[in-house]
Amino acid sequence: MSSSLPQSAEALARLTWADLEPHFAELKQTALDASNVTAWLDQWSDLVRAVSETGSRLSVAVTVNTADEDAEKAYNAFFENLFPRAMAADNELKLMLLKSGLQPAGFEVPLRNMRAEADLFREENLPLVGEEQKLITEHQKITGAQMVEWEGKEVTVQQLKPVFQSPDRARREQAWRLAAERQLADRGALNELWQKFLPLRRKMAANAGKPDYRAFMWQNLKRFDYTPDDCYKFHEAIEKAVVPAARRVYERRRRRLGLDTLRPWDLDVDPSGQPALRPFQDDDEFKAGVSSIFHHVDPVLGGYFDTMRSENLLDLVNRKNKAPGGYCTSFPVARRPFIFMNAVGIHDDVQTLLHEGGHSFHVFEDAALRYAQQLDVPMEFAEVASMGMELLASPYLAKEAGGFYTPAEAKRARIEHLEGDILFWPYMAVVDAFQHWVYENPDQAMDPANCDAEWGRQWRRFMAVVDWSGLEDEMVTGWQRKLHIYQVPFYYIEYGLAQLGAAQVWRNALQDQAGAVAAYRKALALGGTAPLPQLFEAAGARLSFDADMLGEMVALMEAKIAELEG
């Protein structure tokens, strides 16, 4: 990092265009050739890291406290002022490098990405990006403020999740309906917000000369290795290879619960009637248990997590005015990750932290790469890092192996995880198919009633087991409760493809855990320097859309479930 650029977290949070402009100007005035391109790239990389970390830190500030008006102002100011200017200047440097014809070592994939970005870039879209970020903040405020009164206390909708695991069916139904009623109260506000997002995104695509927003996002997400038709193929493969297995999972649950039909509030309770898993009582116990698990997976990875603990890079526990969801972001100047989530003391929290921990390990492993532009990892593989870690960590959930549970509880948790993976693919297909419909039919999608109808159609195609009778509004508005649809459009197929890659990493680990972990770390260290299929190969997997590979992995999961149950 150039010594004249801000480097501390506090200074980066106050970064202005005046701090950056002279550095961009100097780079633009350089006559690029083979003798100076490496030093030029180092300076450019420093600027990219500074802008990226500033945006990340300001974003963290508005999610850890959605009621912090100063943080919101600073976040909005960044996207109104610094960000568009920096992106415009950054694009000029991309064009300089591309025009030079130089091919710096280790820059093959970044150059491919830059060609796509340069082709897509339009200065008139920069203010629209700022507008979009404001809408995202508004979405976070609406969902972050969803509170209910439960047993004499005001709690977040998220904090009702443990009640959904109650053996008392009437109690969990009451909690589920209370949460659904509160979420439906925002139906109108979320519909209005949707009708602002959609035309804004269509305008971005039109400005960039793309026929529709899907084509715009395909290039923006750098999907070089598959097409929308491959997504449709994947949906069909899920329908063929996974939906029957999902039906079997649901049927086992219904039978064990002794019910005629499964209702939405029957999906989180333990089907054997045992109390829900409660892995930890407080934040410290949570962190200590997950640290132990990671150390058992690999001592180096465990050390990475301990660094995050000691450097205050974890915000894990749910509270009022905290944005929903969970994420791992990176601070590229510090070369550190930051994990945000909403733990409420349930097993799902453990899975979430293992997942986000996998993302954080990606940041640690590729930190040695020289240029910031080499850190642009395809999301399809970034999610292999996270989902793969969930599966690699699964043998160590028991206390005797470093985790939280008795051996019997650990088996329950592993079964729940594998069943959850099977059930996820159909849900992922609903989300992805819905988004394809939205951006293929944007005029229709402007009417939220049509969105409700399409979500319902896809839900019945992939998820038609649970009984939603009398709950039509709750079912068809499911798209409003999937934040990706609002905040990160088209980003969801990645999870389905990555889960298939992660399952292959897990398959390898069943034969050779140490070897599978070594391949996993080697692949993470590549960052964004290899194409997507090669990243999968480095991890011991294959990028796949077909029913045969899905069927093989689902069969392996079902066999493991049977073994654990036996």
Image (cartoon, helix red, strand yellow):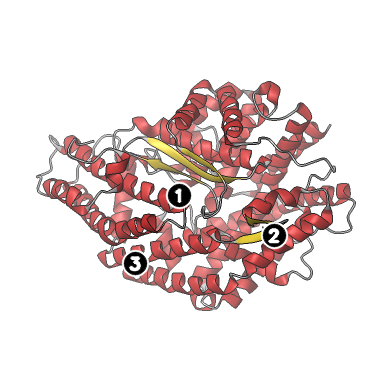
User: Is residue 102 found left or right of 66 in the rendered image?
Assistant: left
Mark 2 element type: helix
Where, quadrant-wise, is the N terminus in this rendering?
Answer: top left
Select label 1 or label 3 by which is in front: 3
Q: Give the image location of residue 324, x and y in percent.
A: 55, 54
Select label 2 or label 3 by which is in front: 3
Query: Which image quarter: residue 515?
Result: top right
Whether pointer 1 and pointer 2 mark residues with C-beta atoms closer than 8 Å, the reply is no
Mark 1 element type: loop
Q: Give the image location of residue 393, x and y in percent.
A: 61, 30
Q: Give the image location of residue 28, x and y in percent.
A: 13, 49
Quick one: which residue is furthest to the front in this view?
152
Task: Look at the picture and state if 388 lies above or below 436.
Answer: above
Residue 225 tag number: 1
Q: Which residue is mark 3?
A: 128
Distance from Cα at disc 2 to Cα at disc 3: 35 Å
Select label 1 or label 2 by which is in front: 2
* 28 and 180: which is toward the camera: 180
Residue 393 tag number: none
Whether pointer 1 and pointer 3 mark residues with C-beta atoms closer than 8 Å, the reply is no
- Disc 2 marks a residue whose amino acid type is Phe
Q: Earlier in the sequence, mark 2 or mark 3?
A: 3
Residue at image location 68% in from the left, 64% down from the top:
180
* 553 and 422: which is toward the camera: 422
Residue at image location 36% in from the left, 68% down from the top:
204
Task: Look at the picture and state if 56 lies above or below 502.
Answer: below
Q: Which residue is mark 2?
A: 462
Query: Which image quarter: residue 202?
Result: bottom left
How busy is the neighbourhood of tag 1: few (under 14 within 10 Å), some, or many (20 plus)? few
